[in-house]
Amino acid sequence: MATTLQLNSGHKMPLLGLGCWRAVGDEISTAVETALLAGYRHIDTAELYHNEADVGRGIRAAIATGKVKRSDVFVVTKLPSSAMRPERVEPCLRRSLAALGLDSVDLYLVHSPVGALERSELTSPPPEDGRMPLHHGTDLIAVWKEMERMVSLGLAKSIGVSNYNERQMRKTLAIATIPPAVLQVECHVYFQQLKMREFCKKHNIAITAYAPLASPGRKVLYEKRGVKIELPDLLNNPVVRLVAEKHKRTAAQVLLRFLVQQDIIVIPKSTNAGRIKENSDIFSFKLDELDMKALSLLDQGEAGRSFKFYDSFPGVDEHPEFPFPVKSTA
Ligand SMILES: NC(=O)C1=CN([C@@H]2O[C@H](COP(=O)(O)OP(=O)(O)OC[C@H]3O[C@@H](n4cnc5c(N)ncnc54)[C@H](OP(=O)(O)O)[C@@H]3O)[C@@H](O)[C@H]2O)C=CC1
Ligand SMILES: O=C1CO[C@H](CO)[C@@H](O)[C@@H]1O
């Protein structure tokens, strides 16, 4: 099967990328270099991950080996909630580019429809319970118009959104001169996003699945905030394991293959060289109809959503553009 997807912007995007959330410093720059040398051609980061400079270092290290060219690498970064104001888009992207050491990114995403205040706007110290200081006046249309301007300035080759719901997608499409090329959302076997996928297919918008393994490493993050939550354990799901045994593959490879085989872009995060390589070996086998059926039956719909944001940022669901079911109804 093809390893890239044609975007509505005319650019090609690799179906496999390296996720970079929750790793900084040499750990992530080495992982990026390792991934690029192992054949990855797509790196997913964000201003929010505080590692753009490290990611840029990793990209340059891979290029320095002579085995990878800048033009081979599809780099994605994201506009943070604190820059969800039209006048902040260009300065924010320029800051990201300076940190990454690049002239342009291949894809710039609005990270989330929820706007937040910058530290400098706070009138009191940030709350200790992890509450995100919200900016309630978020104007998605004005922000999108600025995202489009980033393409005309040549700072982003394609633009897209993340964590938008269908209403927010429709609202954006209604005014867009450049439609979003990509929607990045949580997507894995327990939360298959069938309705959103149908919507995106109809509008020729590609989907990137974040947390394609359901993000098992998040526990530490919640524990730090004293939040107790049950994380789904996809890697030990008996159906996934059975399919993996049948193909002599690992559970992670089956979970990723299940998505790419349906033209869903995947960005598994790993900083372990063995697992980085393991996660990339998903184009040399194929799941048959029976495997695909068995895995698709694992979908739990909305109940399978694992990233609710209010678990890690209490009160975020009070924002008028909070995209998911709010805590009181979930
Ligand atoms: N737009 C958004 O709001 C969001 C975007 N993202 C993006 O999506 C990426 C992926 O999501 P993420 O939350 O990191 O979760 P993933 O589903 O990619 O899971 C990553 C975790 O799984 C472990 N892991 C990776 N490969 C394997 C394997 N083969 N076997 C066993 N364990 C494995 C990793 O540990 P180890 O490193 O030790 O291998 C890490 O703890 C992020 O890194 C980020 O780039 C994520 C969340 C939200
Ligand atoms: O990319 C991200 C990683 O996950 C976080 C949730 O805890 C999000 O805030 C963010 O969107």
Image (spheres, rainbow, N blue to C red):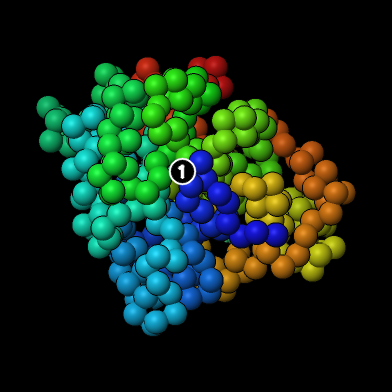
Q: Is residue 122 visible?
A: yes
Q: Is residue 162 something one can see in this rendering?
A: no
Question: Label 1's element?
Answer: loop
* Quadrant of the rendering where the C terminus is positioned: top right
Q: Which residue is mark 1?
A: 9
Image x and y of residue 140, in percent: 34, 24
Is 66 drawn above or below residue 192 in the view shown? below
How far across and down, in percent of the image, does residue 60 sit?
32, 72
Task: Identify the residue shown where x is 46% and y is 25%.
Answer: 173
* Residue 250 position in % (x across, y down): 71, 64
Question: In the rendered structure, which amino acid carries the disc numbered 1?
Answer: Ser
Judge: label 1 CB < 8 Å from ligand 1: no
Q: Is residue 163 left or right of residue 94?
A: right
**Residue 92 appears left or right of 190:** left
- Mark 1, Cα crowd under 10 Å, few <14 / some 14-19 / many 20+, is some
The residue under the point 70% across, 52% down is 261
